[in-house]
Image: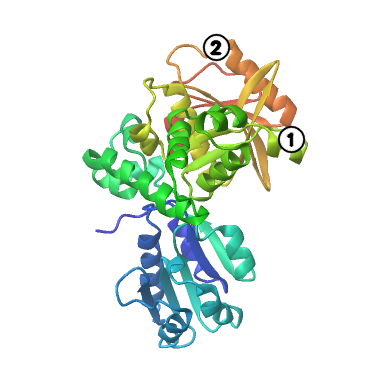
Amino acid sequence: MYLTREEEPDLMRLLDWKESIALIGPRRAGKTTLAMRMLDIWKSRGKPGIYLDLETLGAPSSPAALLSEIKKMPEGGLAVLDEVQVVNGWVKAIRQEIEHKTRRFIITGSSASLLSKEIASSLAGRAIPEPILTLSYGDARSWGLKSLRQYMDVGGYPECVLRPEDASRLHKLYLELTVLRDVAARKGIRQAKSLSDLALVILSEPGKMLAAKKTASMLGISQPTFRSYVEAFNDAYLVLSVPPYMRSPRERIISDSKHYAYDIGLQKSVSISQQDDKGRRLENLVAVELVRRGYSLSYMKSESGECDFIAQKTGTETLAVQVWGGEDKVPEREWKGLEVGMKSAKAKGLLLGLEYADQRDGVDVMKIEDWLMKR
């Protein structure tokens, strides 16, 4: 039985656009299933379409062979090219088809090999990159998870939601595949121990700032290598890095970021920390949901206080977001940090907690679970 996802309405609308679609996101997040769903809808309209899994034996392995297979489909048809990065030079095979609007494409692949910035340049802006993250809390509940606590353990990978008893083992497999195949292979890293060690350090301490100089020294790598590795983790949708809120772009780039996991269940399964910092893990959960809703994030820190997130989106009011993971009254320092963010970024305040908190002027207060379920 097919289970629906909240991304579907927006994706289905893209079928009426002239541009092709590139689905990017973490491994095992369900990109192929969504692509197949879109192809089924396309065919139900009486239009031709094909699906090519380019990782299977016998699949086209060269640009010429790929183009030959595509051209067997009538003009005006839709081709789903799954794991397209396997074919070296695949862009040359389909760019002309896209530019001349001869045929339409849905492209999926390893996100470290199929980045939005590469799609924009190599396909001349005629393919729309659409991020597909792991399942939201709302979708995970509709798929069978029972509570926020369970979601914090299982996360949103579709197979983990369907098989929660196997989630921990699957998370460790996904981490290994991402680090070794998406990041190490892409960067040409033969000795991947420092890469794996850095991934574990970041995922074990969500929401914490890692000093580039100190961490690089600890792992025996240079600071440029550290930054390169972190960027690659972000490209592969393993790590979400949040920079400080600063006016100067240069200062933002060189300052230390806070880092989060793109999937809270994977974070828990692979963490080597002896502490279960519920507050920071809830902060992690909120960060990913804000990104899912289209916000770009930064954090605010000053002598007066710290605001967890400044969330910005074109055409939408900026939000200053504070997350409180305690079950007692919200401390005054949390309110002060939120006020700092609101004032500095001229933002509307949002406080999210496990339970409802006291109201403050200019601040929306919600339970985290209610906010997560709000579409």
Label 2 SS = loop
Label 1 SS = helix
Of the pair 112 and 276, the residue shown nearer to us? 112
Q: Is residue 242 above or below residue 24?
A: above
Report how many numbered discs are placed on residues in the image. Answer: 2
Which residue is pictured at 31% across the width and 70% down the height?
A: 56
Relative to residue 142, is residue 77 drawn left or right? right
Between discs 1 and 2, the one toward the N terminus: 1
Name the mark on residue 179.
none
Q: Amino acid at mark 1?
A: Glu
Q: Amino acid at mark 2?
A: Pro
Q: Which residue is mark 1?
A: 251
Which residue is pictured at 49% across the width and 39% down the height?
A: 288
Name the mark on residue 331.
2
Of the pair 137 and 109, the residue shown nearer to us? 109
Q: CA distance from mark 1 to mark 2?
A: 31 Å
Residue at the limit of the structure toward the right, as seen here? 248
Looking at the rendered image, the quarter that the N terminus falls into is bottom left
Q: Is residue 194 above or below residue 208?
A: below
Can you give x and y, in whole percent of width and height, for residue 369 in the image? 42, 31
Q: Kindly tell me whether residue 350 is visible in this rendering.
A: no
Which residue is pictured at 37% across the width and 62% down the height?
A: 32
Q: Kindly tell me whether residue 198 is visible in this rendering.
A: yes
Q: Nearer the viewer, mark 1 or mark 2?
A: 1
- Discs 1, 2 touching: Cβ within 8 Å: no
Can you give x and y, in whole percent of width and height, for residue 250 in the image? 75, 39
Of the pair 195 and 86, the residue shown nearer to us? 195
